[in-house]
Image: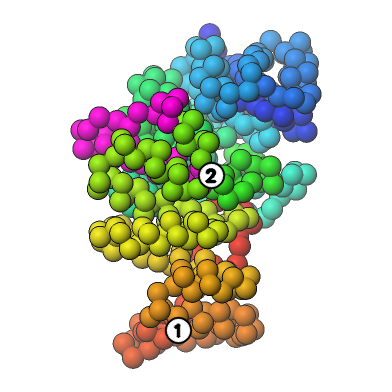
Amino acid sequence: MSKIDILMSVYNCERYINDTINSILNQTFTDFRVIVVDDGSSDRTGDICKQFVAKDRRVEYYHQGNAGIVAALNHGLQYCSAPFIARHDGDDISYPDRLEKELTYLEANPDCVAVSSVARHIDENGIPCGTISTRKDISAADCWSIPAAEPYLLQPMLMMRRTALDTAGGYRNLSVAEDADLMWRLNRIGSMHILPESLGDYRVHAGSVSSRSIVKGRFLAIWSQLAALSEQRRISKLPDIVFSNLLLQRINTSISLKEMIDAVREQLTDSEFFWLHSAVSAKLLEFCYYRPYEPDKSDIQFILTAVHTDRNISERPGYEFFKEAMLSAAIRSMQDFRIKDALSLTPFKQWPVLFGRIAFRTLIPKSTKKDIIKIFSFLSENSNTFKRFANSVKPSPYSDMKNPINQN
């Protein structure tokens, strides 16, 4: 039996799979197996994997009809017998010392059930983007916030104790955000840790599931917040949400956020429904900040309905950031000449702030902006007279410009 089993779900990765598997086989720690599950690839992914199987006994290849990442991961887990499970995607790269450093940390910290690291972003051609993934504060996880603050570990760099994975119940029936759902449950079993150094390359490209379209953004928003709602129920000692095949089908065949949330409505109390409506709205706006899509009219109506019907929204953790996200989306809409959408997202009393920020960001030279921000920051700290004006031009946590990098 190997010390580590590396679980890979792959789908149409022929362009990257050779480099990916080689990065695993060239690890300084060598007592491992690579369990590759091909989720019905239609390109040469399977043929390339079989070539590795023929050359290295540590590589195993299994094929299934296309059924999604959760089905592929659970299929692969039946072949895993090692005490440690490492995850890997078919288009990312592990640095040679990744397994060694993660295993060393887990063995030195028996209370830790899962460890990951940050990763350098690379583009489709393997060229560094100049950024690394966000190292989130796991201790700040809050399932009641809007959107929920997840105890997230970067999945392509993840290593877990097999006993903890089994205790948590493994991967559940979510079409996306299955990783976030697992992290909530692992976080209840023991501590989790993110190593501060980059131990691999995380590929950012247009074909990423999380970057394709606003519909994908809606799926990510609804599933990720359902995972957090599931954690709320565990904390409250209530029966968990049933992630059934029927729920999966209902949500995955929906187009609008309203249809998606209606699909799960019968399982929710009124208070859960209002929280979920607001949290999904906030999460979609968060995604729109750094992914290549914007909310359409149906999304804006969904968001405004949450604002007007959730009586507790202003008291929920994260509400201030939610308001900033709405304002940021309004600024971007205005710059795209979607004036009606921009004004709909902005309460009338905030219109001066909206137009002030647009003017500040579009009409003033960048060098001058920095000087102005310094002045207003000083004045706002020392005089209430300037505080309101300074707030109207200070940088928002959600920029009016797109961030091209996936922040996960």
Q: From the viewer's perspective, is residue 270 above or below residue 100?
A: below
- In the image, which residues are magenta? 218-247
Q: Which residue is located at x 56 percent, y 46 percent?
A: 215
Q: Is residue 191 visible?
A: no
Q: Estimate the spatial distance between the alpha carbons at disc 2 and disc 1, rounded to whole Å.
A: 35 Å
Give amino acid for label 2: Ile
Compare residues 357 and 191 and report the one nearer the observer. 357
**Can you tell which quarter of the image residue 335 is in?**
bottom right
- In the picture, measured across the screen, residue 361 lies left or right of residue 309, that is right
Residue 378's x, y, as percent?
41, 84
- In the picture, measured across the screen, residue 372 lies left or right of residue 273, that is right
Compare residues 124 and 347 and report the one nearer the observer. 347
Q: Residue furthest bottom?
A: 385
Q: Which residue is located at x 57 percent, y 27 percent?
A: 68
Which residue is labeled 1 in the image? Answer: 352
Residue 190's x, y, as percent?
33, 31
Q: Which residue is located at x 39 percent, y 42 percent?
A: 262
Which residue is labeled 2 in the image? Answer: 255
**Can you tell which quarter of the image residue 216 is in?**
top right
The reply to whether the magenta stretch includes residue 240 is yes
Q: Is residue 103 visible?
A: yes
Q: Which residue is located at x 37 percent, y 51 percent?
A: 277
- Give the dominant element type of the magenta stretch: helix, strand or loop: helix
Compare residues 180 and 241 and report the one nearer the observer. 241
Looking at the image, is mark 2 or mark 1 earlier in the sequence? 2
Q: From the viewer's perspective, is residue 45 above or below residue 286?
A: above
